[in-house]
Image (cartoon, rainbow, N blue to C red):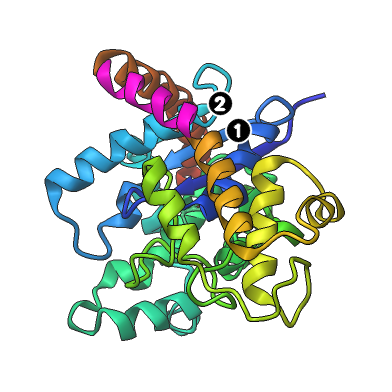
């Protein structure tokens, strides 16, 4: 039987947080042998908000190295840079012609980003979900592992696939979102009900995969808790519960096990233990990333192998699309 196809991507804007690691990249590693995987570095999405060119270039490579350092095997998956595959832009143009301005302007993220970047509400920002639909549909994707914030975009991809298939005949597979549930939601260390975000203005809110040991431990030391001095998972204790979840995710233990381990202990010791386990897990990942970045030739070789595989799959779908919509070709 043919393997099912998984597609996901991350933008090379900003640093990845431990939330991205637990909620996204680490799960992809688990999926890679079971599915045919396409993982992209979404540089074309990134430019919908202003980027410093040198920084975008650096972050693209850093993200590629990080994916591999986290355990993505570039010989098993197609790991590639989105802008290396022209078909993404080409399919976007076709899909634009079946996307209504109304539905694009109703996207929650578009509305949020328009408010945040009021001085730069560009066409790309509105077209962002259509480009994302092109990413997904080009590879005849079955499942799209994403965070809850991207679910609406995957739903638009489904709508566009169905609309196109109805109008022009069966062309695209209709993808399903694969939303990680439960323990995957890691919150800000400063506002425990808000998702940990790489763009948070408070420098102590997020722990980045690039943070060194001292920084990690310091951030956990400053994490907000409560005055109850009891380490247990409870809705009315969002700060402690978040730290416990992070502990479980990095230690690989269950919540009852973690609660038992810290029974009767003080918050200070607990926060230190959380910081230490996170730092211990990240240290080898950071070391591997450093090694990969030191050998740019090897790294770009990995990315071109990925691009080659992506290119073939994408071409096949795009040719079919062009034929169906009536683009003449000899
Ligand atoms: N928009 C996604 C995000 O910011 C990244 C992305 C781009 C993506 N293309 C995709 C995710 C296709 C899944 C599938 O998180």
Give the image location of residue 323, x and y in percent: 49, 43
Q: Residue at x 47, y 71 (%)?
A: 99
Decide whether residue 159 is among the magenta residues. no
Q: Quadrant of residue 139?
A: top right
Give the image location of residue 194, x and y in percent: 54, 76
Left or right relative to 249: residue 277: left
Residue in front for this viewpoint, 166 or 162: 162
Q: Quadrant of residue 204?
A: bottom left
Decide whether residue 286 is among the magenta residues. yes
Magenta part of the chain: 283-295
Q: Residue at x 38, y 27 (%)?
A: 289
Q: Magenta segment, principal secondary structure? A: helix
Mark 1 — residue? 37
Give the image location of residue 154, x and y in percent: 59, 62
Mark 2 — residue? 77
The correct choice, above or below, for 68 with respect to 159 in the image is above
Residue in front for this viewpoint, 76 or 140: 76
Left or right relative to 313: residue 218: left
Left or right relative to 199: residue 21: right
Q: Residue at x 69, y 34 (%)?
A: 31
- Upstream in sequence: badge 1 or badge 2: 1
How packed mark 1 is, by other alpha carbons closer than 10 Å (few <14, some 14-19, many 20 or more), is many
Q: Is residue 164 visible?
A: no
Residue in front for this viewpoint, 13 or 326: 13
Left or right relative to 262: residue 20: left
| CB-based contact (under 8 Å), mark 1 and mark 2 | yes
């Amino acid at each position: 039987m043919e393997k099912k196809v998984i597609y996901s991507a991350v933008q090379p804007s900003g640093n990845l947080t431990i939330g991205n690691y637990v909620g996204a990249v680490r799960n992809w590693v688990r999926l890679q042998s079971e599915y045919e995987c396409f993982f992209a570095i979404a540089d074309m999405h990134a430019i919908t908000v202003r980027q410093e060119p040198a920084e975008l270039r650096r972050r693209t490579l850093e993200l590629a190295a990080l994916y591999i350092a986290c355990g993505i095997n570039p010989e098993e998956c197609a790991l590639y840079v989105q802008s290396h595959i022209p078909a993404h832009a080409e399919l976007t143009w076709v899909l634009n012609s079946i996307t209504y301005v109304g539905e694009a302007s109703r996207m929650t993220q578009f509305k949020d980003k328009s408010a945040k970047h009021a001085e730069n509400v560009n066409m790309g920002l509105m077209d962002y979900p259509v480009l994302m639909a092109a990413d997904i549909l080009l590879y005849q994707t079955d499942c799209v592992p994403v965070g809850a914030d991207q679910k609406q975009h995957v739903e638009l991809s489904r709508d566009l696939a169905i609309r196109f298939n109805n109008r022009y005949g069966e062309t695209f597979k209709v993808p399903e979102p694969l939303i990680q549930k439960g323990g995957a939601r890691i919150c800000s260390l400063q506002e425990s009900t808000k998702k940990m975000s790489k763009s948070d203005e408070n420098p102590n809110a997020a722990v980045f995969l690039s943070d060194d040991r001292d920084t990690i431990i310091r951030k956990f030391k400053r994490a907000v808790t409560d005055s109850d001095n009891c380490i247990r998972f409870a809705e009315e204790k969002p700060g402690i519960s978040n730290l416990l979840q992070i502990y479980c995710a990095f230690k690989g233990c269950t919540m009852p096990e973690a609660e038992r381990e810290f029974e009767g202990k003080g918050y200070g010791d607990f926060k230190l233990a959380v910081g230490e386990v996170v730092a211990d897990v990240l240290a080898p990942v950071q070391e591997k990333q450093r090694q990969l970045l030191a050998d740019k030739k090897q790294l770009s070789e990995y990315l071109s192998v990925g691009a080659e595989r992506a290119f073939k799959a994408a071409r096949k779908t795009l040719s079919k699309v062009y034929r169906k919509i009536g683009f003449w070709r000899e």
